[in-house]
Image (cartoon, grey):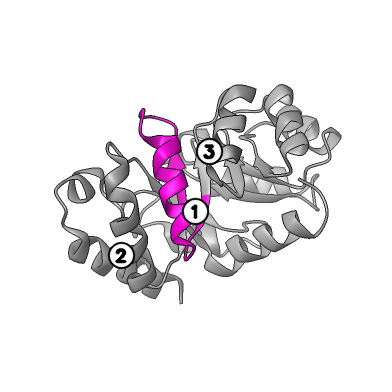
Amino acid sequence: MTGAGAAEVLEALEAARLVPVVVLDDAAHARPLAGALVEGGLPVAEVTFRTAAAAAAIAEMAADGRVLVGAGTVLTPAQVDQAADAGARYVVSPGFSRAVVDRCAEREVLALPGAVTATEVQAALEAGLSTVKFFPAETSGGVAAIKALAAPFGGVRFVPTGGIGPGNLAEYLALPSVAAVGGSWMVPRDAIAAGRLDDVAAMVAEAVALVR
């Protein structure tokens, strides 16, 4: 995605500082979850393509209109199409795929591909991107690895995800090169499935308080 749209989405993600990584087993839970995210003060969601309900759930959240919704675990151009058709504003991939990035550009949605090595970061830069997902963060070197990559790639921003929670969140957010942090601890899959949305809203609010 190029132009003002990409900038707006990036600005919104940077302002939120946290991106809840959501796994939904039933699209019927999407709108109630959107309400919980709004109530908790974090109207952002990355709905992962790890279940068959993903596209429908993204569509429900997009139709709700209160949440900046993106698609996660996007592996193919076809999934980019599904996400964009459903209303996703950004697409997150665990690794770098030029085909996925190019389709995102065609569909005018922001691409956040995974990049944890210098070669992958350079590939993202060559594709015209300046912000990448750093996944899996903790097992790929964590804060120290991001610091090391940020030295030669001064203009690149990272969205680390994977193994991050309340105990180490501050370490990541303290890095100037970190745009936002992704995590699932505040949106547990079992709580959403069980309809415990008040609990989810409370956990989201606690996460927001850590950032603020």
Q: Residue at x 45, y 71 (%)?
A: 211
When the figure is inspected, residue 157 is found, relative to residue 57, above or below; the finding is: below
- Residue 25: image tag: none
Give the image quarter of residue 82.
top right
Q: Amino acid at mark 2?
A: Ala
Residue 57 visible in image: yes
Mark 2, residue position? 36
Mark 1, residue position? 62
Decide whether residue 115 is among the magenta residues: no
Decide whether residue 56 is among the magenta residues: yes
Q: Amino acid at mark 3?
A: Gly
Residue 135 in picture, x, y percent from top left: 53, 37
Q: On the picture, is 105 further left or further right than 137?
A: right
Q: Are marks 2 and 3 in contact (CB under 8 Å)?
A: no
For the residue labelled by badge 3, is the local secondary structure a helix, a strand or a loop? loop
Q: On the picture, is 70 further left or further right than 29?
A: right
Give the image quarter of residue 98.
top right
Q: Which is nearer the eye, 177 or 77?
A: 77
Q: Who comes first in sequence, dot 2 or dot 3?
A: 2
Q: Residue at x 33, y 72 (%)?
A: 39
Span of residues in magenta:
45-69
- Residue 141: image tag: 3
Q: Nearer the viewer, mark 2 or mark 3?
A: 2
Q: Amino acid at mark 1?
A: Ala
Q: Are marks 2 and 1 in contact (CB under 8 Å)?
A: no
Measure the alpha-carbon separation of dots 2 and 1.
15 Å
When the figure is inspected, residue 115 is found, relative to residue 64, above or below; the finding is: above
Measure the alpha-carbon separation of dots 1 and 3.
34 Å
